[in-house]
Amino acid sequence: MKKILVYLKSYKKECVLAPLFKLLEATFELFVPLVVAAIVDTGITGGDRGYILRMCCVMILLGVIGLACSVTAQYFSARAAVGFSTRLRRELFAHIQSLSFTELDQAGTSTMITRMTNDVNQVQSGVNLVLRLFMRSPFIVFGAMVMAFTIDVKAAMIFVVTIPLLSVVVFGVMLISIPLYRRVQNALDLVLGKTRENLTGARVIRAFHREDEEIDDFERRNVALNGLQRFVGKLSGLMNPLTFVIINMAIVVLIYVGGVQVDTGVITQGEVVALANYMSQILVELVKLANLIITVTKAVACGNRIGQMLEIQSSQEDGKEAFVSQMRQTAREKVPVSKKRPGSGDTSSAGQDSREDYIVFDHAGLMYAGSSVPALTDLNLRVKRGQTIGVIGGTGSGKSSFVHLIPRFYDTTAGAVRIGGRDVKDYRMEGLRRHIGIVMQKAVLFHGSIRENLQWGNENATEEELWTALDTAQARNVVEGKTLGLDEPVGQGGGNFSGGQRQRLTIARALVRRPDILILDDSASALDYATDAALRKAIRNMSGDMTVFIVSQRTSSIRYADQIVVLDEGKMVGLGTHEELLESCHVYREIYESQYRKEGA
Amino acid sequence: MAKKKAGLEKETLGKVLRYVRRHGVWLAVSVVMAALSVAGALYLPVLTGQAVDCIIRAGEVDFAAIKDILRQMGLLILLTAVVQWVMNVCNNRITYDVVRDLREDAFRKIEALPLKYLDSHQPGEIVSRVIADADQFADGLLMGFTQLFTGILTIAGTLGFMLSVNLWITLVVVLVTPVSFLVAGFIAKRTYKMFRLQSETRGEQTALIEEVIGSQKVVQAFGHGSTEQDKFDEINGKLQKYSMQAVFFSSLTNPCTRFVNSLVYTGVALTGAILAISGSLSVGQLTCLLSYANQYTKPFNEISGVVTELQNALACAGRLIELIEEEPQKPDEPDARVLTEASGQVSLDHVDFSYVPERPLIEDFSLEVRPGQRVALVGPTGCGKTTMINLLMRFYDVDGGAIRVDGTDIRHITRKSLRGNYGMVLQDTWLKAGTIRENICMGRPEATEKEMIEAAKESHAHGFILRLPKAYDTVIGEDGGSLSQGQKQLLCITRVMLCLPPMLILDEATSSIDTRTEIRIQKAFARMMRGRTSFIVAHRLSTIREADVILVMKDGHIVEQGSHEQLLAQNGFYAELYNSQFSA
């Protein structure tokens, strides 16, 4: 909570003024019963109409001042609360942008979204309420008691007893019901779970004709929820009647004691009326206070969660070196396939270290945070500029983790990955990533037009460059099939495109930046074989020097790669060309044969 | 427009009342108790006033009378409190029971809705109707019960009591109170627009947050963070402006109405005090009137809040009831055939089907499948393979032609028995929240432990299940929770292995399983398919080579049909597809 309160600093003035004006308002409110007592005692008893009129003017004046104070207070508190939450949201957003993949994995997407939306809103209303009411309510409660003391000590003792009693009831009922409400919420979650499950699993449930059982199950949960709600309702329904009894019984006692005091001449009739009025004021404020405490507790919990989020530090330190693109000037020209074979690439513009080996995995290992088993162990690979590398292995064998080391999505926990002779950790991350085009497994597009999405790859790309990329990605017909072409709007998450279309567009997006290194992370899975093959062919013909990594489950996709990396449980169990691996690597052979049977062998 | 909305509200109200009527007894009790509690609460100030009148000045205090009045007060207080509690309990009961009934009806409807509806609506949207809307409706209804009724009673009662005490003061109160409404109404109108702007901007911002944070990795991979931050800051600034207006102006309601209340209070004090001097009103009566003046304006403020709350609640109820009244799938015909142990003869006879009438998908599709045949469906994405499954399982009904199983049109077979004859493994691996055991035995809850383990061994799931913390009793979360995609798929296969119905549908059934496990499962599948009519959809052509008939689909049509060898010999579309996986 402390961590986030610093963002209130620029609103110091507001944070002082808002409660201050609230206190002023409350003070004026406390004077009203005294004025009424004066009207009764002096005005009525003395028959002084002028005095009564004057006193009524005083009351209106008190009201006007109260209103003015209150409006001022509301203004300052709104300013502070809204300004605070705006700042907080901004910081959170920026903070999340600065986190590395490791922290993003740990925090989880839905959590981060909740923090930014719901939690910040809760904190905003919490701050607003605290500034307005946290001082006011206790002040009125105790103020009323103090006022009672100024009237008569003996009568005031009734206040001394009533206030704690009321507090016990009000806070007691709340304390007991809060955990119960949590149980209600859990019961509701169960109902929610069942409902969602039956929507997402409608096909399976109907295929196994389980509808009746599901209804029974839902009914059980629904009835359980209902029972809990009724029970909590009974309990929290006690609050009003109980406080009603306490306050009114206190008034009864007050009148009796007041009678005794008036009889002995200690106080006047009007003062008895004033005491009764103070008593009524207390109840209203105590209930407000109790509600406030609930809101504040929630807000503090939300605030703490936000604070924890802000405390997460990125585990990656940015490097200092600029990444220099070494793409050939003539890269746009199509280069015959044969020229791209190992060693034949044009390396004249490459730095000294990269003449031979452009990308080097040097005993690289990766252990994800919070995991006890390494995802990758002791990987060694030397890649020459312009080579195509195939990566294959079963699910969970570490294919994605392997290529994620190149753009430094994750840092190696052992060994190193070097590009152009330098550890990737030495490069400035932004520059490094600008020269890498990655197409992730999950094809994500963003709200906007197709053009805007493609320009993610390169903001300054020309129309021609966009179409070239689309051609290579086999996505020209996707765009041409839309009425607005490149300006066709893309819905949130790309919902208005099929899986295969999205995948091809994300490939085009990566190509638009004409990267030094292209990584296709199982990104042709939704494409049929023919399209997949055409895509690979186009990429190979695309440019001279681009180094390509293709991750796939299909041997057909990587068969013609210069080097194929075979991964199994994070270890490299094979490295070589298709033919070499068929000879030497039984895992590769097994994968291959499962896909081709006799033909391949 | 407004009229139409009002009509709709009225209609919804009628429907809601039908649900409330089931709890008529409780409603009656609640109404009586509300009347009693209001009467009690209103009579109390009268007694207080009487007691104050017994306390004039030193030496002039009538203790006997006071004691008598106070005793009455005590009794009244206790009674009123009890009545209040009973009323609360009744209201809670009615509300929660009505919502329970609504939810149950909604869920029953979900189970009976055609898949067409479910496919075209976001699950989240329907869930929000059953959960959030129902909850909000409950809140509004509860508030309505507790505050609307007692509020109106209190106003009427207060006026009555005031009139009985003094005409003039009542007039003062009646004349000043409307000012409070005017002020509240004025503020509400002004803030409505601001709130709308605020929630629109908030929605815009949430959409951006969900999109950017949801795909944070892509954003970072493309170094797009700072562009997105600029976009965010712009919306954030806009939101600050609108929020400030909305928060500030809406928070004016309270101080302003409080001010008007104090005017009423002062008016009563002034008139009352002057009347008291002339002796037509006692001090006790004035006290009583003042406390009425305090109470009187409160229900007014509350009622205006309750009315908006109720409107909101009705809108929520409307959405829920809309779902409940949605057209269910056509029920089974009363004389529909119950298919027991089908032979597996399936015929598709000139079938036409489309999801949207404008875009015909499957046209004039005919096919004869003999019992025990293996039919493979091949073709590029979106060619209608999955649609065939929808039709075979009767998730959707054909538009023209007919599908027959064992010679009977499937529309004349009960859904339960038709689907019971199919074993289905889908690409989309869906598991329910529960134990592994519950999931595997979904199709055959009566299966023995031995049979279950047998099936799990057959599908190669036994090994990994045993490694789970509680083996077969491990509870998995919604949609498989922490299991890997491949493990989930193994469980789905086990689920079918246990039932072994006469016909099988395998839609990309092994797509997420690593190739080495897949080989083993394929063997199990081959055993399973022996003697069973099977429909297989797969990308990997190797998985379907052994099928008896391969249907090559393109744009909803069968373009080629035959065995693997025949199709290769034809050197057509299939051959092209098949060869493309070897070429590069």
Image (spheres, helix red, strand yellow):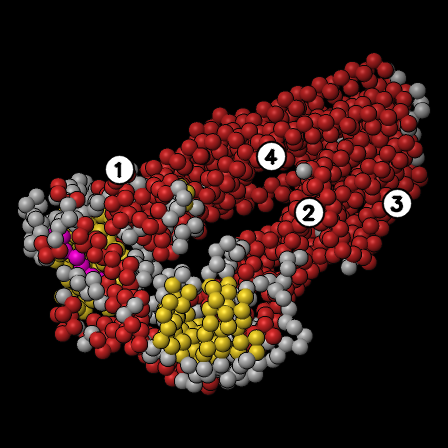
Query: Along the polypeptide, which appears first: circle 4 or circle 1?
Result: 4
Name which residue type carries label 4. Leu
State left or right for residue B466 relative to residue B263: left
What residue do we see at 78% from left, 52% from top?
Answer: B87
Callout 3: SS: helix
In this rendering, which labeled residue sits more in front, label 4 or label 3? 4
In terms of depth relative to the viewer, which is nearer, B439 or A503? A503
Provide the residue designation for mark 1.
A462
Q: Which numbered disc, 3 or 1, marks the residue closer to the eye?
A: 1
Mark 3 → mark 2, Cα distance in angstroms: 45 Å
Q: Quadrant of residue B73?
A: top right
Give how far across and how far down residue B511 sits, in percent: 35, 68
Chain letter of disc 3 in the image = B
Reading the image, the residue beneath label 2 is B314
**Looking at the picture, do discs 3 and 1 lie on one chain?**
no
Question: Closer to us: mark 1 or mark 2?
Answer: 1
Residue indicated by mark 3: B71
Badge 2 sits on which subunit?
A: B
Which image quarter is the N terminus of chain B in? Answer: top right
Residue where numbered disc 4 is placed: A133
What kind of residue is marked 1? Thr
Residue drawn at x 85%, y 37% is: B156
| Range of residues picked out in magenta | A385-393
Residue drawn at x 36%, y 65% is B379
Task: State the separation of the CA atoms marked 4 and 2.
Answer: 32 Å
Q: Separation of disc 1 and disc 2 at Cα?
A: 53 Å
Which element carries disc 4, helix, strand or loop? helix
Q: Within 10 angstroms of label 2, few (less than 14), some, or many (20 or more) residues?
A: many
Q: In this view, does A117 lie to the left or right of A588?
A: right
The span from disc 3 to disc 1 (Cα, nearest Å) is 91 Å
